[in-house]
Amino acid sequence: MTTKIISMTPTRERGWKMGLGNMLAKELAAWYRTRRWWIQCLLWLVILNVAGIDLNIRGDQTVQQAGSGFLTMAGFGLSIAAISMAQDSILGEKHSGTAAWVLSKPLRRPAFVLAKLFAIGLGILVTGIMLPGAVAYFQLTHFGLQGLTPVGFAGAMGLVALHTLFYLTLALMLATLFNGRGPVLGISLGILLAGLMILFFANTPELLLAILPWRLVMPLGGGPLVGYLALGAPLPTLTPIIATAVWCVLFTGVAIWRIRREEF
């Protein structure tokens, strides 16, 4: 007969960080002590690098079109994944009663939200951005894309990460505000898909392009900002980048404020 020994680490944090280390370790274990991390790696390599670049270049697309398509596809696909993971992380625990049990321990509610944000964000960053981005750089240079630099392409992938973070924090916030998956998915995906739909309209309000993250990865208002960075060209505007970062902080703040008032 074997005996499982469960190691418990005393909590030494104080204030809003109380329990953050233990909660973060638990959330990261769900990524890196299971098959989840390498499944995610394989998934994004197939979707973004094989289908998004290799097959398109071997088809009828130029290498520049394939590179632009890769960045847009990464921003769009990773945002959908972030929405799904974020809403399931919060609502899944609320519906199962796990959230109430966990929060009865020495764990502050801000730490509960931040641990999930850090773990999901880091998981997507490693498996969906850093690994496919590094492979994509070598693919595009191998196929002869001119003007591509490591620093510029890393900056472009950074904008993809910021775009993804917007939808991750939005979904986390909505999951603290609503108890059903419908509103969370509907609002988050609605904003994401709206950016895709306005591609078919000639006149898009400049205010929306300035305050929402659509232009970071989508060909709106003169082209996606990721394209400028990837090729080392000066950015025509910084407003969407700043606005997106502000939204991420705001969404996180609202999520922490709401979870503090949640009754389990």
Image (spheres, rainbow, N blue to C red):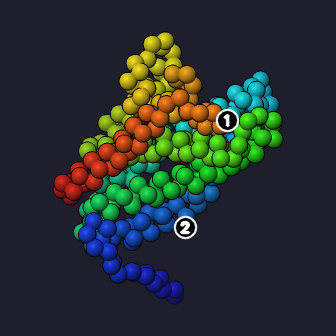
Residue 73, can we see it?
Answer: no
Residue 262 screen position, x and y as percent: 20, 54
Residue on which the image places disc 2:
33
Circle 2 — which element? loop
Residue at image location 52% in from the left, 23% down from the top: 220
Foreground mark, 1 or 2?
Answer: 1
Residue on which the image places disc 1:
231
Residue at image location 45% in from the left, 84% down from the top: 5
The CA distance from mark 1 to mark 2 is 38 Å
Q: Amino acid at mark 2?
A: Arg
Image quarter hosting the C terminus: bottom left
Is tag 1's residue or tag 2's residue first in the polypeptide sequence? 2
Residue at image location 59% in from the left, 41% down from the top: 156
Residue 263, can we see it?
Answer: yes
Q: Amino acid at mark 1?
A: Leu
Residue 58 screen position, x and y as percent: 80, 31
Residue 136 screen position, x and y as percent: 70, 43
As drawn, the label of residue 112 is none
Front residue of 117/155: it is: 155
Q: Is residue 20 left or right of residue 126?
A: left
